[in-house]
């Protein structure tokens, strides 16, 4: 059987640190080898959310499946790498069925039985819930940080902080320090972004 691999990470931070892509690809290659599948192409999406299907590598994968009759399996590390939206998952599953392409996961049990399809749909729903809940919790944390007098993100340059990187979000160390009139600024070497008047 011929298979294509699809790997995705959501954030640029994950891409920069290579936290996930190499691990996903290694697991999928090992799984495909164990199954005796021939990998014909690898599609990699870097720093793109799974909430939308408007992703360059995913669109290229779909186009290949549409035009090439020799693709039997789309292999992902986990189902949520393909999409984090129940509607998109159902649409993609219907697309792959039309083109006689199977979806497989290197880490999750999936099959075409009635119970297998049920479990797959539950996993898709959980992926959407996780994504939506994560967004909501992030916004809540940012709002709380602002209400405490801190920053919802890393403190801007020129803002006094202490040596603790998280202090940029604390209420006691984020007041802008104004140099005396005529004073020059230099780095004191303390903390991340402390400025002092000389």
Image: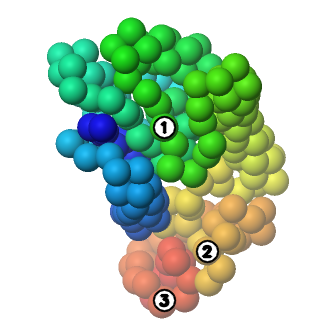
Q: Look at discs 3 and 2 and give the one toward the viewer.
A: 2
Q: Nearer the viewer, residue 185 or 142?
A: 142
Q: Look at discs 2 and 1 and give the one toward the viewer.
A: 1
Residue at the image position 43 percent from the left and 27 percent from the top: 102
Asked whether the residues under the numbered discs 2 and 1 touch, taking CB atoms below 8 Å apart as contact, a structural biologist would say no
Asked whether the residues under the numbered discs 3 and 2 touch, taking CB atoms below 8 Å apart as contact, a structural biologist would say no
Where does residue 13 sit, x and y in percent of width and height? 44, 58
Query: How many numbered dots are placed on residues in this image?
Result: 3
Q: Which residue is mark 2?
A: 165
- Looking at the rendering, in which quadrant would you find the N terminus? top left
- The part of the image, by quadrant, that contains residue 160 is bottom right
Residue 145, numbered label:
none
Q: Nearer the viewer, residue 128 or 175?
A: 128
Residue 188, numbered label:
3
Q: Which numbered disc flags the more N-terminal residue, 3 or 2?
A: 2
Image side of residue 77 versus residue 62, left or right? right
Q: Is the residue marked by circle 2 packed among few (<14), some (14-19), or many (20+) residues within 10 Å?
A: some
- Looking at the rendering, in which quadrant would you find the C terminus? bottom left
Numbered disc 2: secondary structure: helix
Numbered disc 3: secondary structure: loop
Image height check: is 128 above or below 148? above
Image side of residue 149 versus residue 70, left or right? right
Q: Look at discs 3 and 1 and give the one toward the viewer.
A: 1
Q: Which residue is mark 1?
A: 104
């Amino acid at each position: 059987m011929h298979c294509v691999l699809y790997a995705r990470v959501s954030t640029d931070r994950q891409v920069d640190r290579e936290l996930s892509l190499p691990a996903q690809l290694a697991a999928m290659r090992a799984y495909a080898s164990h199954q005796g599948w021939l990998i014909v192409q690898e599609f990699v999406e870097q720093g793109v959310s799974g909430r939308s299907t408007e992703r360059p590598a995913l669109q290229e994968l779909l186009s290949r499946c549409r035009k090439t009759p020799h693709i039997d399996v789309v292999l992902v590390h986990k189902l949520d790498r393909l999409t984090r939206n129940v509607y998109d998952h159902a649409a993609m599953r219907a697309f792959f069925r039309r083109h006689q392409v199977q979806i497989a996961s290197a880490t999750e049990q999936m099959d075409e039985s009635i119970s297998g399809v049920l479990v797959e749909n539950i996993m898709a729903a959980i992926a959407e819930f996780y994504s939506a809940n994560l967004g909501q919790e992030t916004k809540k944390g940012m709002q709380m940080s602002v209400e405490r007098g801190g920053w919802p993100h890393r403190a801007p340059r020129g803002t006094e902080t202490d040596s603790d990187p998280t202090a940029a979000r604390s209420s006691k160390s984020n007041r802008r320090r104004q140099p005396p009139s005529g004073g020059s600024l230099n780095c004191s070497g303390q903390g991340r972004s402390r400025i002092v008047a000389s």
